[in-house]
Amino acid sequence: MADRTVRPAGWWIKWLKEGLLLLGMLALSAAIAFLLFYFRDVFSISLQSFGWLAYLVVFVVSLIGSCTIFVPTPSSAIMLAAATIWNPLLVGLASGTGDAIGEMTSYWVGYAGEKIVVDERLPVYQKAVGWMQRYGVWAVFGVALVPIVPFDLMGLAAGALKIKWWKFMLAAWCGKVPRAIIICIIGHQVPVLLNGWRF
């Protein structure tokens, strides 16, 4: 008889929540981009001249979004919306930099004592600690580039293991900036694709 893997009760609810969160982020991105294009057309203004302000807003929103531990914020939606209008490389650079600096919050909380925020017996936290012990800052870089587990857990683990703060931030920046740039380039192409589908 074949061994069947038993899934924990409610596994589909987790996937449903994550799917709805992704759809919500995409809908919010589309709404913000629509409003920007709408204001551009109604008020006949060139949004390109506000690029410096857009990069600053994306940086600040990403910074604040990363400072909140385990609380989702619309920073990705704002980044995607901004990338549809302004230079996606600069939007990605601003977002990734703000994101990496903001992640220092979880690092310092972990450094001070991770028990305040997370139960150290949590399996996903144990996985983050194991990766940190095995791969060091390369684990930070990998999870920043491809978020397998919530990055806040990597910050908590890095802080708890007393990894040097500048190594953590550099690894986070090296992973988050390319990831943000790739997302922004994809987001920048969406209006082009939508215009191509017009009949």
Image (cartoon, grey):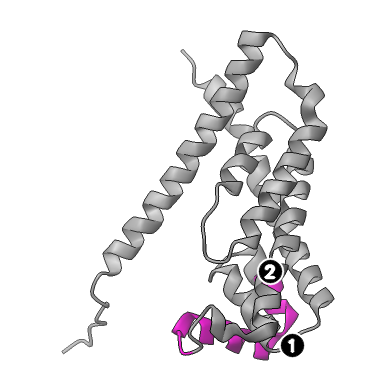
Q: Answer above or below: position of 179 versus 129.
A: above
Within 10 Å of disc 1 (Cα), the crowding (few <14, some 14-19, many 20+) is some
Q: Residue at x 34, y 64 (%)?
A: 14
Q: Which residue is mark 2?
A: 105
Work out whether residue 6 or residue 100 is closer to the camera in this orientation and state it: 100
The main secondary structure of the magenta stretch is helix
Residue beneath label 1, please?
162
Magenta region, residue range: 121-142
Marks 1/2: CA distance?
Answer: 14 Å
| Above or below 4: residue 31 | above
Crowding around mark 2 (Cα neighbors within 10 Å: few <14, some 14 to 19, many 20+) is some
Figure quadrant of residue 173: bottom right
Name the quadrant containing residue 67: bottom right
Q: Nearer the viewer, residue 98 or 48?
A: 98
- Which residue is drawn at the image coordinates 58% and 29% (left, top)? 33
Q: Residue at x 59, y 61 (%)?
A: 68
- The location of residue 132, given as percent across then percent down, is 66, 85
In the image, residue 138 lies in the stretch drawn in magenta: yes
Q: Does residue 8 appear in this view? A: yes
| Residue 175 point in image, percent of width and height | 72, 64
Q: Quadrant of the N terminus?
A: bottom left
Secondary structure category for the residue under label 1: loop
Which residue appears at 24% of the width and 81% of the height? Answer: 6
Q: Does the segment drawn in magenta span residue 137?
A: yes
Counting from the top left corner in percent of width and height, residue 177 is at 74, 56
